[in-house]
Image: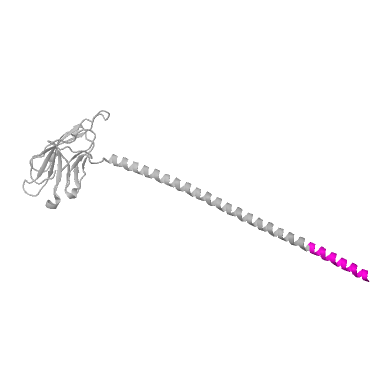
Amino acid sequence: MSFGAAAALVELVEVEQGQNATLRCSYKTQTYGHLNSCWSKGELPSRGMCGSNTIISSDGLRVTHRASHRYVLGGHLSKGDVSLTILNVSAQDTGTYGCRVDFPGWNNDQKHHFLLIVRQAADPTTAAPLNTTSSSALVTSDLHFTSSDLVSSSTDVWTSSSVSRTEEKNSSTVLLMCLFILLFLLTLIIIVIIVIMKKRRLFQKMSENLNSVQFNSTNSTVHLEQRSQSEREENIYS
């Protein structure tokens, strides 16, 4: 609810037990600046702020009083959003609530009342979805997370992120091992090829040397035979 003129409107808000109830209340900081505001359990007094029934109050920038940690001003206070959120409502929270903003001027405070009704939680296995709005009442659903919800959510995200990082690390390790094995096999193949080529060249060289030796031996034998015959011929002539 945004204040502009005085009104006697009462808004009905219905929520199930265990949910969060949000009661909307705001003013225009562009026009009025930052103003004091408060919430009361029960009807607002005719004068002053919220009196002895004050459950939470603000100076326009920060919370100055809080009767319970379940009462939260979850909007942007600096922008004039002083909506009240009641965390984890129970049957004891049923009743009238009032929002009051201290506007400048004599008896110029603006106020608005809400009637909060807390329903007993339905059996989730049999209950159908509930209609949260009607033509004669404004029903506000829960738009905020509790601190336990936030902790649980952040824990789940951190766990999921850790598992993902572990899987990525394992995948990287397997990939590196595969690359190492492939590199080792390639190196081994190259070494074997080099050894085979060296042995082939050595065998070829030995074969060439052996042929050369045989050829020289043959030439020597032929030369000796020719020389022997020549000497015999000379002896005959002599």
Secondary structure predominantly adopted by residues drawn in magenta: helix
What quarter of the picture does the N terminus occupy?
top left
Between 129 and 17, the residue placed more toward the observer is 129
In the picture provided, is 47 more to the left or to the right than 15? Answer: left
Between 237 and 225, the residue placed more toward the observer is 237
Expressed as whole percent of the image width and height from the top left, the position of residue 114 reads 14, 38
| Residue beneath the point at 74% across and 62% down | 212
Farthest left residue in view = 106
Q: Which residues are magenta?
A: 217-238
In the picture provided, is 30 more to the left or to the right than 156? Answer: left
In the displayed structure, 178 sits above or below 41; it is below
What quarter of the picture does the C terminus occupy?
bottom right
Q: How is the protein colored in the picture?
A: one colour
In the picture provided, is 189 more to the left or to the right than 38? Answer: right
| Residue beneath the point at 64% across and 57% down | 198
Expressed as whole percent of the image width and height from the top left, the position of residue 19 reads 23, 36
Between 96 and 143, the residue placed more toward the observer is 143
How many dots with numbers?
0
Task: Tell me, yes or no, whether the highlighted magenta stretch contains residue 152.
Answer: no
In the picture provided, is 183 more to the left or to the right than 67? Answer: right
Farthest bottom residue in view = 238
Query: Where is residue 42, by image quadrant?
Result: top left
Task: Tell me, yes or no, whether the highlighted magenta stretch contains residue 229.
Answer: yes
Expressed as whole percent of the image width and height from the top left, the position of residue 38 reads 15, 43
Expressed as whole percent of the image width and height from the top left, the position of residue 139 reads 17, 37
